[in-house]
Image (spheres, coloured by chain):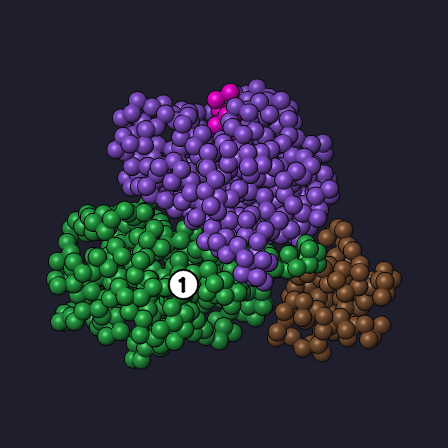
Chain colours: A green, B brown, C purple
Amino acid sequence: MAKKAYIIGSGCISPQNTVDNNWFFESVVSHESDHLNAIEPSYKEYINPNMLRRMGRAIKMGVTAASIATTEAKVENVDGTMSGTGLGCFEDSERFLLALLRNEEQFLTPTSFIQSTHNTVGSQIALIMKCHNYNHTYVHRGFSFESCIMDAMMSFDEGKHTALIGGIEEHTPIYIDLNQHAHKLDSHIDHKYFEGKDLGIQMGEGAAFFVLSDTNKNASSCIDGISMLYKPEVSKEILLKATQFLKQHNTSLENIDLVLFGLSGDKDLDKHLLDIIAGISKTNAVGHFKHLCGEYHTAGAFGTWLANKIIQKQNIPDAVKINLSNKTSVNTVLIINGYLNINYSFTLLSKC
Amino acid sequence: MDALIEKLKVQIIEQLNLAEVKPEDIKPDGPLFGDGLGLDSIDALELIVLLEKHYGIKIQNPADGKKIFESLRTMAEFIKSHGKS
Amino acid sequence: MISAIGNNVPEALFSLSNSKTGIGKVNHLTTRYKDEYLLGEVKLSNKELMDVVGSTAPGLNRTSLLGMIAAKEALVNSGIDLKDGLRTGLISSTTVAGMCNTELYYRDMVEKHGHLEVLDFHDCGESTERIADHLGIKDFVTTISTACSSAANAVMLGCRMIKSGMLDRAVVGGVDSLSKFTFNGFNTLMILDKEWCKPFDENRKGLNLGEAGAFIIIESEASLKKRNGKALAQVAGYANANDAYHQTASSPDGLGATMAIEQALAMSGLKPADIDYINMHGTGTPNNDQSESKATVNIFGSNVPKFSSTKAFTGHTLAAAASVEAVISVLSILNNKIYPNLNFTTPISEFNLSPVTKVTDAQIKNVLSNSFGFGGNCSSLIISKN
């Protein structure tokens, strides 16, 4: 990927007050719970009621985040829309499935089935924008959102100029209950994400969308590149890949002003990333973000939103910091995200 | 007939999740689809299930819905002539 | 490829060549409508599929099994050695993923907290990772879900990644198993035919659902040269457009489909007259076949090439449909044959277009293959003789 992708608009719905595009950690919203619920806006301000009546939460969050992003970017159309979601519209899937099982396949209505398909958010965006261009949905765990970035950057090399990309995930009360019984979750408010002491994750949800452009006009930051790594065996493999990735972009770890880690909070799942943090925190400013949004397939989209804001505002919020940073300017941020110790990704953002 | 129409209003609002619509907004002879309530083909399928669930009437061919769901009154008339209850 | 018409490509070719449909009475899927509807089921049970794969790993579901078998067949036939230092990716697609198992246990999970392990095997990425691990692919994996056009988009992404230099080759395609969830979903939309589907027939009533795993391997010329490989065919064009008309229905003017075909043609540098055969999406629903016919006429005018929908053989295999049909398109090119549109008798009066209804010999250099899906997703591929 030769061209950069400039962020010219963003919209984020998360367990923080991010709906307001001007808010930036004036106060952190702490959730003393094993799951972090998104703080949702009044959707009526963003979506027409006739469309709204059928939408599940994932769709509402996704469409609204996309709308905030396109409004900020002042674009009415894009050359491509790429959406990422690991679980899709889970609420509708669950509703249709339970109705099917409980009524023994009778009296079923189509709405929740139609809305349950993974590409619903992307297609609703196309419908609302009346956009006939390229539309794609990625559904691969911790690569879902990252595949969107890759696709958009590739499309710029192919001659396209704009893209709307995003990551969306929702949880439901039943999904939370099942996870509480199936997995170890943690609800400590002082959960030690980066000390490697605790077990269990905090579940999260949200949606973040970005309008990307191949030119830097009105850009808040730019994405220089993305790379993904599947099932590394040791932490060295991750570090090596990160080093190679940075080299491809003519830089190296020493030049990175902030390395932002997507730690899940579970010391076993995070063992490789914790190794890396221990290795680089003497020389690099390091931070993390999933304690603010929770763990989910497309948490990388929240991480990207955060990195973009940090560069735009030239301010690393205290809530993000793992070590003390004396950086006065933040020109480059490297996100190293992990999901289930299976999907790792590297996203490089810089000031433009 | 009028009682049935009133009942249908409430059932339609519930089935189609028309949060913004009040029963008095739906006119007995006004069109349900297109310019009327703004319903579409998916709503027609929802109404077919409504007839099956509440009135025991099975419609096999979705194309038949067009006539039946023209307005509240045509719907009520259809139920009267086909329904078990 | 594994589908209702055979557990591998030679078996599928035999069925196609003999006009033998794979759609029939329900054998494997548990549903109260078992005796009312027809399905294009893969003939093997889960147990038999596990025997083929040689694994009984926990959480291994029918979707993953079909994918593992199909992708492995493609890889073995290609003669590729994954350890030769070239970069290989896996781009799969699915809509059902683990739902085929989740639906069996969800009540127990929700009401009694039983079978909770199933939760971790539900998502789409899980099935792709099973396939990747089965083949030994590590360089790149991702999964696409754009409803019934999914696998066409997987082919497209693979081509783009190879062109951009990110990969040397990619295993691309899709997989969906039959599930109560999708079966009942389509049933609520009232677009299932209780008899054999009749694509492009005036009296068509709907589609028959099917299941399949189908993969093709695409490779750069440089990579082919390096390993002395030979290509079966080439992907000459691809495009993805959105109808932006309705969440499920296709537009009556076929706008999205027209755009996809037009852009794929433009990319290939071919003129409409260069297309020798169209493998249509042709699901057999009143709406799709009308919209697709319109798009076909929009592009080809009164010179519509020979065409057929092969869904009356395989059923509509959703996320796998485009890769099933890519394999059939390659078979058409290799054998210079058009495989028929079964069950057709009367043309749609609005268009008066008649598909090929018997196995037909024809010189085939360029095939257009269409795949359209819910959410307005329209994708077209052009596959050409090498």
Instruction: Specify the quadrant that holds the C terminus of chain C.
Output: top left
Q: Nearer the viewer, residue C204 or A234?
A: A234
State the image coordinates of residue C282 (x, y, percent, origin top left). Answer: 60, 39
Residue at x 31%, y 80% (from the top left corner): A27
Q: Is residue C191 left or right of residue A352?
A: right
Q: Residue furthest right?
A: B81
Crowding at dot 1, Cα within 10 Å, few <14 / some 14-19 / many 20+, comes out as: few
State the image coordinates of residue A267 (x, y, percent, origin top left). Answer: 30, 61
Q: Quadrant of residue C352?
A: top right
Residue at x 74%, y 57% (from the top left corner): B65
Q: Chain of mark 1?
A: A
State the image coordinates of residue C233 (x, y, percent, origin top left). Answer: 42, 27
Q: Nearer the viewer, residue A157 or C146?
A: C146
Judging by the rendered image, the residue that carries numbered circle 1 is: A184
- Numbered range of the magenta stretch: C328-335
Count numbered badges in the picture: 1
Residue C181, magenta (yes or no):
no
